[in-house]
């Protein structure tokens, strides 16, 4: 059963149903963990840049209006670029697990050493926008120009072309069209399942669900300690492994260096990765790899295509 269309794409409420295909990932594992490091610090909106508002999601610092910006608020973002990102990368290096970066162009333009660090580690780079800003109200021409500029910065700083595009406020008609025109292999602006999908058919991008309930933004609103957030991550992984609903699944963990990179919180990431590495049935993978696996599964036995997407017999 589907309901109203959104941007020529039906809203699929049925998905894979109660009994999805039982195929596992090609590695034989049941859960693919996607660690996503959001590179936003330095690309946020702030009055000192001439924006109408300050982005307030830095940390505990509240936004007190200033005619020329709020330097203390901005410093909360600065922590992610100056210290938090290096702690996160050290944790990933020590564990030997792959990751994907959702990177804003301006953030890497202002921090080229970080772009080189991502390149040295072969981190997958997804375009997170020229600025860390909403995109839904941008005209198609404005969006296209900003995506062109951001992609150029990402290529200059990391040597890699972005594999996808992720918006702060989700897709618009313009961003769906532009993403399709650029031939991205996967799309990440979705929260609708535990499994990827091919909403535009076998030739379209693989949609890999992102997640809010395992995002470290919970440290701003829900959890006071690393132990609480670590428990949340471990519980999510264990549920996906133990759930009787069959088939391969994906667990996305969104990370922001200005939050998870803090010394009081970083232990949650260490603990979660250690738990995943020693637990059978878990594989850590970049999102481009997950997309390739899912596409191959759909081509080989239809496991990656939901019943509502399959042609009628």
Image (spheres, rainbow, N blue to C red):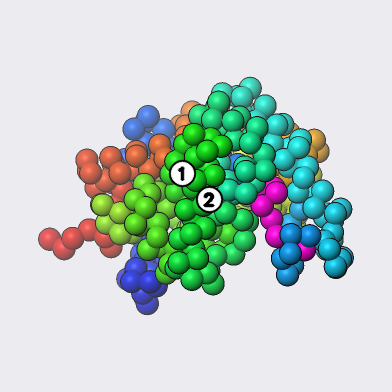
Kindly check if marks 2 and 1 are in contact, taking CB atoms under 8 A apart as contact.
yes
Q: Earlier in the sequence, mark 2 or mark 1?
A: 2
* Residue pictured at 58% horizontal, 48% vertical: 105
Image quarter (top left, top right, bottom left or bottom right) of the N terminus: bottom left
Residue 240 visible somewhere in the drawing: no
* Residue pictured at 44% horizontal, 41% vertical: 161
* Residue pictured at 39% horizontal, 72% vertical: 6
User: In the rendered view, would you say 227 is above or below 52?
Assistant: above
For label 1, the crowd category at 10 Å Cα-Cα, with few meaning under 14, some 14 to 19 and many 20 or more, is: many
Residue 212 located within the stretch drawn in magenta? no
- By secondary structure, the bulk of the magenta-drawn segment is best described as loop
Spot occupied by residue 172 in the image (x, y as percentages of width and height): 46, 68
Q: For this view, does 270 lie left or right of residue 206?
A: right
What residue did someone put label 1 on?
162
Is residue 34 or residue 138 the one in the foreground? Answer: 138
Nearer the viewer's eye, disc 2 or disc 1?
2
Spot occupied by residue 274 in the image (x, y as percentages of width and height): 62, 28
What residue did someone put label 2 on?
150
* Residue pictured at 80% horizontal, 52% vertical: 74
Question: Which range of residues does the magenta coloring cover?
Answer: 40-47
Q: For this view, does 247 lie left or right of residue 39?
A: left
Q: For this view, does 310 lie left or right of residue 99?
A: left
User: In the rendered view, would you say 5 is above or below 28?
Assistant: below
Label 1, secondary structure: give it: loop
Label 2, secondary structure: give it: helix
Image quarter (top left, top right, bottom left or bottom right) of the C terminus: bottom left
Is residue 233 or residue 66 the one in the foreground? Answer: 66
Spot occupied by residue 143 in the image (x, y as percentages of width and height): 49, 63
């Amino acid at each position: 059963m589907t309901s109203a269309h959104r941007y020529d794409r039906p809203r699929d409420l049925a998905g894979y149903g109660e009994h999805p295909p039982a195929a596992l990932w090609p590695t034989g594992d049941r859960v693919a963990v996607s660690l996503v490091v959001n590179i936003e610090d330095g690309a946020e909106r702030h009055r000192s840049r001439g924006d109408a508002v300050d982005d307030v999601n830095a940390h505990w610092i509240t936004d007190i209006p200033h005619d020329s910006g709020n330097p203390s608020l901005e410093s909360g973002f600065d922590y992610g670029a100056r210290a938090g990102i290096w702690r996160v990368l050290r944790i990933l290096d020590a564990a030997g697990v792959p990751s994907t970066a959702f990177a804003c162009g301006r953030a890497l333009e202002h921090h080229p050493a970080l772009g080189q660090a991502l390149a040295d580690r072969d981190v997958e780079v997804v375009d997170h926008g020229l600025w860390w800003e909403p995109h839904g109200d941008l005209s198609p021409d404005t969006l296209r120009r900003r995506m062109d500029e951001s992609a150029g910065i990402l290529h200059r700083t990391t040597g890699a072309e972005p594999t996808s595009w992720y918006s702060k406020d989700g897709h618009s008609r313009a961003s769906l069209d532009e993403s399709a025109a650029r031939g991205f292999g996967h799309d990440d602006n979705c929260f609708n399942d535990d499994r990827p999908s091919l909403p535009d058919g076998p030739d379209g991008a693989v949609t890999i669900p992102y997640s809010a309930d395992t995002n470290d933004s919970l440290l701003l609103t829900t959890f006071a300690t690393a132990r609480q957030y670590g428990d949340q991550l471990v519980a999510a992984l264990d549920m996906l492994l133990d759930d009787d609903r069959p088939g391969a699944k994906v667990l996305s963990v969104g990370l922001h260096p200005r939050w998870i990179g803090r010394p009081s919180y970083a232990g949650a990431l260490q603990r979660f990765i250690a738990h995943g590495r020693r637990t059978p049935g878990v594989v850590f993978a970049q999102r481009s790899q997950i997309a390739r696996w899912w596409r191959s599964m759909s081509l080989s036995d239809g496991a990656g295509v939901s019943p509502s997407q399959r042609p009628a017999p």
